[in-house]
Amino acid sequence: DHKAANALEIQGVGRRFGGFWAVKDVSLTVRPGERRAVLGPNGAGKTTLFNVLTGDLVTSAGTIRMDGADVTQMPMHKRIKGGLRRTYQHAHLFNGLTVRDSLFLSVCGVAGGWQRFMPLRLNDGAVAKAETLAQLSGLSAELDREVANLSHGQRRQLEIGMALAENPKMLLLDEPAAGLSPSERPRLAELLLSLPKHITIILIEHDMDIALKTSDSVSVLHNGQLLAEGTPENIMSNEAVHKVYMGG
Ligand code: ADP
């Protein structure tokens, strides 16, 4: 079989805290370049699943394959070297730097928390690349602004721009719309839709509207287990999903 390997393939994955399974027997497959949203009410297990995918947490059961390779026992820094990146619910940024400097340092391999695992890469192209990243993340007009003076939405954009600095293969976005004002949300959705198509994106999102608008497929978690999976249209008309979301 010469098909390209799946970007992500997890089989029976679980994570236990004491006697409590926060994620239980989850299996799913994500194709290269796919945009997958992971939805679910608070406590559904979304963050735990993310942490297991990145290697922030070890699994209690099951297997995780990325690009065809079994990474279940692989430490986070090795997954990062393999092209995995994540953003956090609370952006990890330096307030005293400008947007330009933040992106520049990311390109050089020194600004993101994960970059402690990466080699330093000083090069003449880094300034131009920082400007390209600003464009990609919708921050071209803010290059000289200090991070401290950015709006909440712009901080989320910057974090995504920084995560793109090393051409990730797979990007895990942890609730990028959390805390955004209604007027900032469409811009974030637009940014997510404009990201390079070859990057596989897995998005945890509480905002159902953004998740459905920006994804090819959706996995819904409930009580740590997969409740439903399908296209955004399927999920929107899924009764079990409505019940869980509307508290019915
Ligand atoms: P979500 O991100 O969907 O809101 P989480 O993955 O944060 O859900 O949490 C799923 C469940 O696991 C919750 O009931 C939460 O209380 C529990 N949980 C998460 N992390 C821990 C932990 N470190 N220790 C004990 N329980 C945890």
Image: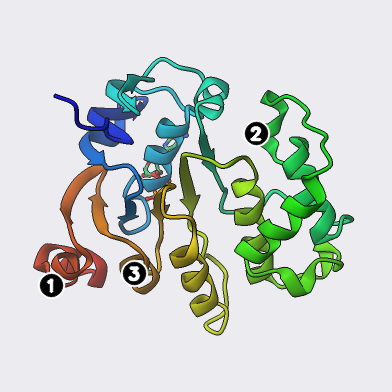
Q: Which mark is residue 159?
A: none
Discs 1, 3 touching: Cβ within 8 Å: no
Query: Closer to the N terminus: mark 3 or mark 2?
Result: 2
Q: Amino acid at mark 3?
A: Met
Where does residue 206 sit, x and y in percent of width and height? 40, 63
Q: How far apart in space, not on screen, are marks 1 and 3 (Cα)? A: 13 Å
Q: Amino acid at mark 2?
A: Trp
Q: What is the quadrant of the N terminus in the image?
A: top left
Q: Which mark is residue 208?
A: 3
Q: At x 53% / y 70%, what residue is drawn?
A: 188
What is the residue that sits farthest to the top in this orientation? Answer: 73
Q: At x 53% / y 24%, what residue is drawn?
A: 76
In which image quadrant can residue 157 be found? Answer: bottom right
Q: How far apart in space, not on screen, are marks 2 and 1 (Cα)? A: 39 Å
Q: At x 25% / y 67%, what residue is drawn?
A: 245
State ligand 1's quadrant.
Answer: top left
Mark nearer the viewer, 2 or 1: 2
Where does residue 74 sit, x and y in percent of width and height? 45, 17
Disc 3 secondary structure class: helix
In the rendered image, the vertical position of residue 219 relative to residue 11, given as above or below: below
**Which residue matches tag 2?**
114
Disc 1 secondary structure class: loop
Q: Amino acid at mark 1?
A: Ser
**Which residue matches tag 1?**
237
Q: How far apart in space, not on screen, are marks 3 and 2 (Cα)? A: 29 Å
Query: Closer to the N terminus: mark 1 or mark 3?
Result: 3
Mark nearer the viewer, 3 or 2: 2
* Front residue of this view, candidates 162 and 237: 162
In the rendered image, the vertical position of residue 118 relative to residue 111, given as above or below: above
